[in-house]
Image (tube, grey):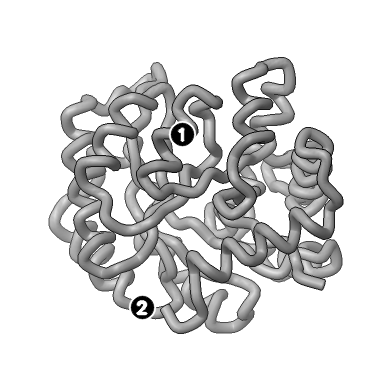
Amino acid sequence: MAGMMDSHAHICGKDLSSRWRETAAGAKNAGIEKIMIVCRDAREARRAIDIAGEDSMFDVAFGYSPNDTLKVGRTEWEQLEQLLANPLVKAIGDIGMDYFYYETVVPQVLQKELFVRQMELANRVGKPALIHMRMAGEDTRRYIKGHLKVPGIMHNYSGGWELMKDFLDIGMYLSFSGRILLEASDESTRKAVREVPLDRLFLESDAPLTTPVEGGQSLRLYEHLDQVLDYVCGLRGMEREALVRAIHDNYMRLFPRNL
């Protein structure tokens, strides 16, 4: 039987990096076959590459999030280009747009510049993009349509049914996290989960950001992903094994072993 694929987890952040072996062991015991480690800086990416070299259950993605835009200078960009050349780095991300009301707000025009620049880099290296979108659905859709030439994943998808078709038409996959459990009363979210084509669907833990946390560390990544899996199966009227197989096939198609 195919194993479950977790398309987005921050294993190399400060909360989980020192305990990655424990996380891996628990995930394997729970039937998770692959975890995409998503990194926000070069230090995390180098650590993730080391982990992926030691344990093949891990793949690596690296990119600068919109909230880190002001930290990206020439050195950071050169590090990104260098690390994306590593075959263990399967994707660039997560990149995108975020219009949430943070204490420090990154100007939208600067977010757009970095987003477009990173999409163009994804096009050059031929690797998929993991897209972060928060309260920025229309701009994200427009910029992807205008600039991204490779496929990608709408990480932690929050655009509801209304934007879903646009992203599918562009060639994107949709990945759902535990956020859909919190939005269980929202019909647009439920409709998106029910109607996204099976060959465009991913699930993710987004650990430790949307997983249960104890003492600052996410200890139940695999249990949380299992809850999301059950919820999606219930909405779609599917057996678990069929959904796991479909997500497995999607992952292997988007991130082939020879990439």
Label 1 environment density (alpha carbons within 10 Å; few <14, some 14–19, many ≥20): some
User: Is residue 232 shown above or below 15?
Assistant: above
Q: Quadrant of residue 138?
A: top left
Amino acid identity at mark 1: Lys
> Residue 165 — which label?
1
Decide: marks 2, 1 in contact (CB < 8 A)? no
- Which residue does the numbered mark 2 point to in the structure image? 86
Asked whether 120 or 68 is in front, the reply is: 120
Local secondary structure at mark 1: helix
Q: Is residue 117 visible?
A: yes
Asked whether 216 or 208 is in front, the reply is: 208
Asked whether 211 or 195 is in front, the reply is: 195
Q: Which residue occupies 67% across, 22% down?
A: 183
User: Is residue 189 shown above or below 85?
Assistant: above
Q: Quadrant of residue 178?
A: top right
Label 2 environment density (alpha carbons within 10 Å; few <14, some 14–19, many ≥20): few
- Quarter holding the C terminus is bottom left
- Quarter holding the N terminus is bottom right
Measured as percent of width and height from the top left, residue 180 is found at 67, 30
Local secondary structure at mark 2: loop
Compare marks 2 and 1 and give the one earlier in the sequence.
2
> Residue 192 — which label?
none
Measured as percent of width and height from the top left, residue 142 is found at 26, 33
